[in-house]
Image: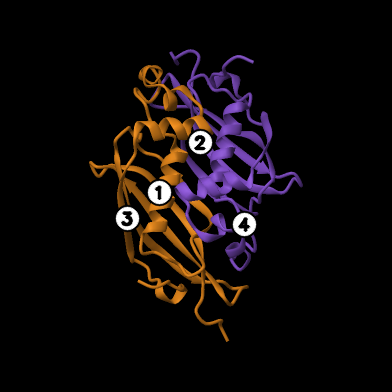
Chain colours: A orange, B purple
Amino acid sequence: MSLRYLEDFAVGQTFTAGPVRIEESEIKQFAGAFDPQPFHLDSKAAQSSFFRGLAASGWHTAAITMRLLVESELKPAGGIIGAGFDELRWPRAVRPDDELRIEAEILEVRPSKSKPDQGMIKVRTKTLNQNNDPVQISVGNLVVLRMRPAE
Amino acid sequence: MSLRYLEDFAVGQTFTAGPVRIEESEIKQFAGAFDPQPFHLDSKAAQSSFFRGLAASGWHTAAITMRLLVESELKPAGGIIGAGFDELRWPRAVRPDDELRIEAEILEVRPSKSKPDQGMIKVRTKTLNQNNDPVQISVGNLVVLRMRPAE
C-alpha cells in the first residue's frame, strides 16, 4: 500500500499490526532507563506491589504501540505525527512474554481551517494482549497532509 | 523527604526535577527501537519533514518526563502508578542537546469511593526546554495509597 493523504482516510477504517512479544529483559531495560520503580525492575519486589508481579511501564507499552502503528498500513504521507491525545489509559498490566497487537480505528477526518495543505485524523488505538484483553487504549489526533490544497 | 500518602498531597503543591540533556544519539536510538520514522532517525531527511530538522519521538519525551517524575519529590508511597491521562500533547519539538526539566502541579486530591485504602491525585506535568518553552503537557491521574483506611 502506498502512502495515504487526508483524502484516503475515512471514518471506520481499521488498521492492525503485531503481535510482538515483550520479554522480561526488555521490561527491565526500559524501566532502568525511563521508569526505575521496583514493580518494573525487580520480580520479587513487584510481588508485594500494586501490580502483584512484574509489569511493564505504561510508557513502554505506549512505545511498543507506536512501533506497531508505524508498522501498520496506516502510513500517512508525512509520517505519523501526533498532535496530542484526548485519552490514554492502561486498563491492565503488561507482563513478561505477553504478545501485543494493535487495532486502530479512524474516528474522525477533518481538513484544517487555517492550513490548506493539512488536516487531522482522530484515531482510537487499542493495544491487546494474547487473551484479547486491552492493555492500552488511546485516542490521538494525527496531523495528515492533504493531497491537493483547498481552492 | 519520606514517602507521601494521599493525606500528604494538597491542591497547588508543585514538584520539579531536571534538567537533563537529551543527546542526538539517544534520540536516534529510541526512535530505532520504538518510532522508526525518518524525522526521528536521520538529520538530513528530517530537514524536509514536518519538523524541519531532527526531533525526538514524543514517546521519548514522555519517557524522559516519567524518569524526571520518579526523581522528583512527588514520591507517592505505592509508587507512581498512572491510571490514565486526560490530556497529553507535545506543543513543540524536542531537539538534540535540549535540556528538559519538569514542573508538576497537583490539581485534585480525592479518596476512592470503592477502595478505602486508595485515592487518586490529578497531576499536570509540564516538560520545559532550556528556553522555558513547553515541549510536553500532560494531565494524568495517579493511584495513591491512603495512610489510614476510612472508617
Kindly identify the amino acid type of the residue bearing the numbered disc 4.
Answer: Leu
Marks 2 and 4, the one that precedes in the sequence: 4
Mark 4 vs mark 1: in front? 4
- Return the residue nearer the eye: A59 or B86: A59
At x 42%, y 71%, the residue is: A3
Q: Disc 1 designates what residue?
A: A65
- Return the residue nearer the eye: B82 or A63: A63
User: In the rendered view, does B32 fall on the left or right side of B72?
Assistant: left
Q: How much space separates mark 4 and mark 3, taking CA atoms? A: 26 Å
Q: How much space separates mark 4 and mark 1, taking CA atoms? A: 22 Å
What is the number of the mark on residue B141?
Answer: 2
Kindly identify the amino acid type of the residue bearing the numbered disc 2.
Answer: Asn
Residue placed furthest toward the bottom: A151
Kindly identify the amino acid type of the residue bearing the numbered disc 1.
Answer: Thr
Which chain letter goes with mark 2?
B
Q: Position of residue B22 (x, y in %)?
A: 64, 42
Which chain letter goes with mark 1?
A
